[in-house]
Image (cartoon, rainbow, N blue to C red):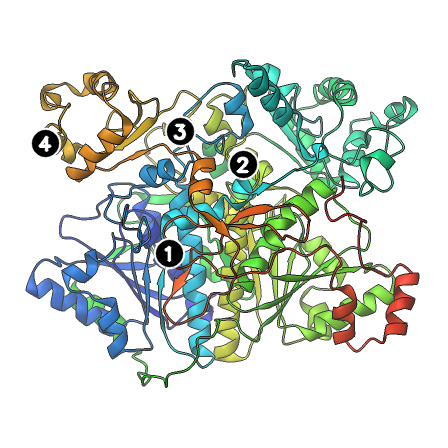
Amino acid sequence: MQRSTLPLFGVKVVDFGQYIAGPAVAMILADLGATVVHIDPPSGPLWDSSANATLNRNKLIVQIDLKTEEGLLRAQTLVEEADIVVENFRPDVLRRLGIDFTALRQARPDLITVSIPGFASNDQLRREWRAFETVIAASSGVFTSGILGGLNRVLMGISPSFSPLPLASAYGTMLAVSATVLALQAKERGGTGDHIEVPLACALMEGLAYNSITIDDLPLRYKSPRERELERRRAEGLPMDLSYGALQELLDPFCRHYKCKDGRMFYAVCHSHKRHAKRCLQVLGLYDELVAEGLPEETDSYLPICEWRSDASINVFPLPKSWADKIAGRMKAAFLTRTAKEWERIFGEGQIPGAPHRWLREWISDDHAQRAGLMIEVDDPVYGRMIQPGPVAWLEESGEAMLSPVPRKWVTFDEALATLSPSSAERSAAPPDRARTGWLDGVRVLDLCNVIAGPHSASYLARFGAEVIKIDPAIPLYDCSTTIIYGMTHMRGKRSVLVDISSSGGREVFEKLVKSVDVVVWNATDRQVKRMGLDLEGLKALNPNAIFCQLDCFGGIRRGPRSDYFGYDNLVQAATGITLRFSSSAETPEDHAPTAGTIDVMCGFGAALGIAAALYQKARTGHAGRARTSLSALSGFLQTPFCYDYEGRGPFDEPAGPDAKGYDALTHLYETSSGSSLMLSAVAGDLPRLARVEGLEGLADVSKEDRSSFLAMAIRKASAEDWLSRLNAADIAAAICENIDAIRSANSRPADGASGTEQDSYSFSTDHDHPSGHAVTQVDPYAIRSAVGKVYSLSPAEKYGASTRRVLRSLQYTEAEIDTLLAAEAISESWSREYLPS
């Protein structure tokens, strides 16, 4: 299959990016078919990493010195030929070098320019900081707020916690590239170009939306045993010193790590679902005996707990300790009867979420990863045959062309210009002044998704003007800790409809909805999609003009052995090496940034990217494509700094485990006299300036082996605030390790109907009149800041089913017909009396 079949073929990009986010945005555009010229300084990339082979695939690389008159003229000439220009420097750096996006867009209103600074350009405190990945993470509360490792690390007394995963850059990339293609399709549909700013700190905050939300007076039923233990220890003044083993005993048996016959650990994640826990016990051979012992199963878990027949239910998280201990003990014994690989097949074929823990180096060469196209081979000119992460999003009809990327290639300026010039399109004139509109105004989306990644993608589209209708079963499949708590984030900006699609009346409602929209989104396997009648032929019969977007757990461009296996964010972490890296031990796996903080939300942005690419293709050709992404595809991208292999590759020795505090002595977490931790993020080239900083005199004479102890002793002598002032004055990258609770408190305002894009790097809103009856504080939809496209504030999440009647009226159902459907239980207007069941 030729690259000419790809949706962005013919789009021309100039990439000034360095490090990760900028080059990654351009890489993804190139993967989707765009022609990309990457500009490096004469000395080469600022980040010396083998990962540049991945980040620059499908690109031509030209070396230009922007500090010379000739170099600047050459860069400007390349930009003249571009449709999109990408950079990720500090605010105004590129303008000072002579590439002024504002002036460029005044001359060429069709141009799309993309800036990805570390902190927002209107953040007067931080905008000039050297915003390396670790600096953004520290400033945003990642290392000290119980985000990494969740409550486990807090209860073990481990703070701060370090991780080498570039969360900020990964979230920033996916937000920036999806916004870029959304702006591109809006231009194609009759608009103009745009300038888009995506600060990495804002992107990171949006990625951690499910980790930072607070709900006042949250009922006790929604608090896990670990949360209750944390509150108890704080109330009684007890130390946070729980062992790893003790923490495991606080886990729900259906969301827990189990040792198998071969000594490997297997992660079962089958809690909260109506059928998964039961299926799990059945394949383990435990269900019947536990039922005989009185295993409880509440038929309507959305009732207040005081109205339940017992104090627990197998399909509700969490189980009381008495039942949790009994079930976990039986499950431990059962898992020891088979190997992890055997259990993986049994769980996968039984449609039960579970996966064995693997190291990254195992995942890279995994049979499924390679056969599905989640890992691909590239003949790099430096490293030879190289395994790299596959594409993050694709269209089914052209994805095959993305599996054989062109290796990066260094070219002369004339060669780069000749590549961009031949297909120069006619420039558009400046559009007349008009009111700002959203990139997706007039686009109707049907959201069939559940849990997090899928529904988050549709909520993201709503901020740009898409009308989103969320359809859920008339009787819920998940317990309310999953639907309602998570839904307070991803149900914003949507209308909720409850339909039993298996009934004849509900199926008719469903088909009418499908016929009424432009986009259908569903997180489901191929098997489920076909059964629902939304495969290529089925959707064509219902609505040939609709774009279909599918997300799943292990899917790739090609089918693989585990393509139809169920799973979630934490299972993909287990399968692809993230969990074991975070723990550093195969015996003690730990989730990395649980509750959607690692892959889920990122995958939602990946789905939005696929939809944007399909919308652009449809605007250009009239063809409605089928967009795809998966959690596993995003896992590979997230691990870009070390997710590659080639002959002669060094060891997989990135920082790992609870004792990791950085990469080396110069990029490291240090204790200060004020009790706060300081993240120093320097490189060898900074040593002369570091040695001139007050309190660090003599550093230049210290051996490399002794730097860590020297710096630890020196930094402990002054406060974090003093060190930040001194290091910033010397233009040394550093940050105080902040706490997410303090960040939210300092940057929250009463909900005012604004999106937050006018705020600086941190922005939260508190809705005191939330439909739930609880005050809810959430991060704003504020990371995408566009000069032309309007970003809308999102309405709060309505009660599930609140719009059922209104939506059916819009489909021309009469009140009598709606009442008949309600009586037949084909539709519903609510799952419960209370918004948040007590």
Q: Earlier in the sequence, mark 1 or mark 3?
A: 3
Residue depicted at 24% across the width and 78% down the height: 107
| Gap between marks 2 and 1 measured at Cα | 26 Å
Q: Earlier in the sequence, mark 4 or mark 1?
A: 1
Q: Can residue 374 be seen in the rendering of this structure?
A: no
Kindly identify which residue carries mark 3.
162
In the image, residue 291 above or below residue 475? above
Q: Measuring from the top left, give residue 380's x and y in whole percent.
A: 31, 49
Residue type at the position of mark 4: Pro
Kindly identify which residue carries mark 1.
198
Kindly identify which residue carries mark 4.
688
Kindly identify which residue carries mark 2.
573
Location of residue 15 by image quarter: bottom left
Q: Nearer the viewer, residue 455 or 380?
A: 455
Pointer 2 with pointer 1, Cβ within 8 A: no
Residue type at the position of mark 2: Gln
- Dot in front, 2 or 3: 3
Residue depicted at 37% across the width and 73% down the height: 10
Q: Measuring from the top left, give residue 801's x and y in whole percent.
A: 76, 58
Residue that extends furthest to the left in the rendered view of this protein: 69
Q: Earlier in the sequence, mark 4 or mark 3?
A: 3
Q: Earlier in the sequence, mark 2 or mark 3?
A: 3
Q: Can residue 497 be seen in the rendering of this structure?
A: yes
Residue depicted at 69% across the width and 27% down the height: 252
Left or right of 556, for residue 123: left
In the image, residue 699 above or below residue 482? above
